[in-house]
Image (cartoon, grey):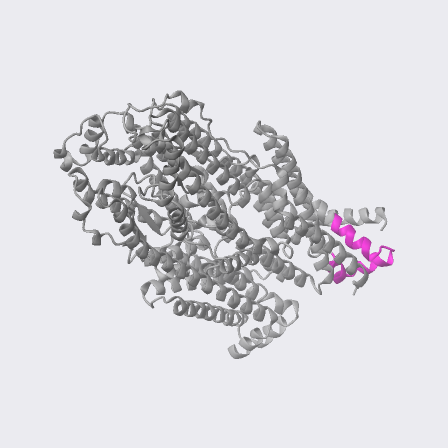
Amino acid sequence: MYRLLFRQFVRTKTCQIGLALVLLLGGISIITGKQFLINQAKIADQVVEKQLTHIERNIDLHGDDLPLLLYYLKFTLVHATHPLSGFSIGQRDLNPSVQSVTILTLEGQKYDTDLVNPTKLLYGNLDLSFIIVYVFPLLIIAFTYNLFSEEEESGTWKLVNVMAKSTLAFLVAKLSVRFVLLALVMILLLVVGALVLGISFDGALLLFVMTSLLYLTFWFALCFWLICLKRNSNFNALALLSIWLVLVVLLPAFINSYITTKHPVPEALSTMIKQRDGTHKKWDSNKKETLEAFYKDYPQFASFGFPPEKGFDWGWYYAMQHLGDVESREDSQAMQQKIRLREEMSKQWAQVIPSMHTQLALNNIAGTGLLDHMDFLSHTNEFHEQTRLYFYPKIFSDKDPESVEWDRFKPEYFQVNGKMEWIATLFPLVLSIVFFMGLSFVQIRKK
Amino acid sequence: MRKEILFLIAKQFWASAFKSKAIYFLLGLMVLLLLYAAYGGIQYHDQNHFRENHQQMARESWEANPDKHPHRMAHFGTFAFRMKHPLSTFDFGIESFTGNVVFLEAHKQNMVNFSEASFSTSLIRFGELSMAMVLQTILPLIIFFIGYTAVVADRENGTLKILLIQGATWKEILYGKAIGLFSISSLFYLPFALIMVLILITDGHSTSDDWIRLFIVLLTYLLYLAILAMLTMIVSVSSQSSKNALVKLLGLWLLFVVVLPRASQAVGSYFHPTPTKLEFKGAIEEEVIQFGDSHDPNDPYFTAIRDSVLKVHNVQSIDSLPFNYGGFQMSVGEKISAEIYKSHHGELLNQYRKQNQWTKLLALVNPYLGVKNLSMTLCGTDLESYVGFQHQAEDYRYNLAQTMNELQVKYIKANVSSSEGAVNVVDSKEWESFPNFSYEYPTVGPALQNELIAIVSIACWMLFSVGMMNYWSNKASAL
């Protein structure tokens, strides 16, 4: 029977158009992912090359003056890209993956955005996660909305009633044909994508695939429940599309708007002003006070003492730069906390909304979420501090650039590994599947 | 076409639409969406207060500077905060993806930072709930839902034959029903228009330009509804069954709203790649150095300038010049680097425009994109409005840097090279007399010129829909 059902289904126009569309879009999405990864690799390559020539050129120009040289020198931290991010680009296209920072005030540097076309960001990426979260549910709806009703409307249901041992088994058989077909298409896209993007077949990919398949199953469960209501085709099509609209458009938009208006981040703006004032107003204050404040943070340098009040002093200059970060720290931390709170709230809401959960989970596995960027920013702070601490003693003691081991300053990479939360990722989806299966079961028993 | 018959049919369409309870539910849903979207829009727009406050804060801090060397002020710099257009309450456009504040200082064009999206989880990528979004994407579905059976169901149950026998023509039936559907969708639309008028009235700062913009926006959506109503009739009359009509309409919606926009952007960025930030900055730096590096004491360009200045003033060293040479040299350097930056930035913007061109051209086959693009532009939330802000901020920055250089040339002694301390300073009154940054929105005329394609698209779709209605009036059959 399965073979016949399969053949019958594959011959329909809906099936052929649907599959052609998803394969075409899937192909585009894999190319999009590949482009993204190539671009990221290009950036990483340029960074390595640039860092070398950048240091050399500046040593040539200011080689006799280390503090002046450090005013110009940029040190690079790269946010390593996991190949899976080609599947789920998330927020990685709008947050930069490279921090090139001098040892001057960090708060004025680290939020520098990338160069991106904002219109492109608005429409979003056509990556594989988009196909999984948006397009597959539509196919499931198109393939199943008239699973039962078409039989009744064309008059074949009576025939099925008479011929089939169990009408339920017949419906389930029809449904499984569609499920298997779509699951295979999804796996095909994921496997081809993994090969093209060079994703290794490891735990992360397995979790990615399982999340996608469970999401697919969730939509089948939902559609099956609606089919069990035994309404006509028009009703089913409209109801399912409305549910799709609510789950993948309205609810996420609604929740995002709720979270952003509830927690606006004006601290970002005040951080900017405070770091500037914190640094630049020191030009008008006395040098001793500035250095005292600096030594409070770094007592290990207190032995370098205080420069004369008259005239310029580099140690004082870098102390004043550091105080820009100190005086904006409160606002900066408030901003960080709010952004993390936004992420936390999104995750909580997503627990009960499978579409949102799947998108956030896929980004999380690929390391392309907001939190990943926040972690990168925090790591930038550490990176900046370590670089400063290496140079401070040399600045204070008027060392030559020759005393610096320049080889140490190759671009550094930031990568978080093993952030796979199996249960937290899969459980909400399993729960939603069980929920709709339960509803269907109740519906069937009623009849 | 006879007017009475048209209205009779339209009235009958109303009556039958309001017979089902679903329409009250949909109306209720729309009102809820509208209220939430309007609330969200006003909240977003209220961020202007934060920005105004911070612009003020930055200004006060600027003015509070004591007597200083002007070059210290050039690096003290200031900020430009991007203000939202009053109509951005209606259509968020690319607002959330563009930066909101830029630090303006000498020698350096900084990035515009802190876009809303950079603080947001990827939920923002599902799309944002604005009044324009509800009208562009949700209302069409409601129109399809109310109208998809209009003709085909009458054919299925035989009432069409009766209508035709009683003397109504096909044209009257199609247009009558389209008018009926259009007027119902206007009922859904009316609260949106009223709320926008109300928002603009209570805004207090609204100008006549804002009102012209709003008027065109409202008219655009009205035309959009007319196009959608006619499209629904065309699909309904050309379908075999009501199920077919529904599936076709939903398919169109998906294609227009979900698939084509993203696909066109994917194609655009594939064919018109943009430089990475490193390449972009590297290219500018390279060109500036090629031209003349003011930081290099042996740079040939700047030594030539110095020599000729010395010659004109007939002195041996810059210390004997009647003005501060450092200030003069920086003003030359600033001019060069600003021009080079401008040309590279212009190239980059053109590349973005080329990327977007695919989406813009697609409006000719996709009315949704036509309305979306036009709506963004009129609400001051499109790429060009953002570019306008960037240009104004850069002009202000340039002016600031050059004014500080002039002050240095004029008031700082020739033999002074250090900017440190309270010795070589300019009176703090100068800081106050330098004007604050204030952003001017572009006027509606130039804005519209950027979206000619969208205007043409909407006009073409109107004509096309009328043409198809007439075509089916002749071709349709009652069986």
Residue at 41%, 37% (x, y): give it: B332
Rendering coords of residue A305 (x, y %):
14, 31
Q: Residue A81: x and y, percent?
A: 35, 58
- Point out the stretch of residues depicted in magenta: B151-179
Locate residue B199: give its quadrant: top right
Q: Residue at x 49, y 71 (%)?
A: A181
| Residue farthest toward the left in the current orientation of the protein | A303
Q: Assign the magenta stretch its main secondary structure.
A: helix
Look at the image and say whether residue B173 sits in the magenta stretch.
yes
Q: Nearer the viewer, residue A429 or B398?
A: B398
Residue B113 as seen in the image, left or right of residue A311: right
Q: Position of residue B147 (x, y in %)?
A: 69, 53
Indicate the quadrant containing the C terminus of chain A: top left, top right, bottom left or bottom right: bottom right
Residue B59 in the figure: left or right of residue B26: left
Tell me if residue A277 can be seen. yes
> Which residue appears at 73% of the width and 50% of the height?
B16
Residue B29 is at least partly visible in this image: no
Position of B412 compared to B465: left or right? left
A261 within the magenta span: no
For residue A408, side relative to residue B331 (left or right): left
Front residue of A207/B151: it is A207
Camera-side residue of A381 and A312: A312
Q: Nearer the viewer, residue A118 or A124?
A: A118
Q: Is residue B282 above or below residue A26?
A: above
x and y, in percent, of residue B404 in the image? 40, 30
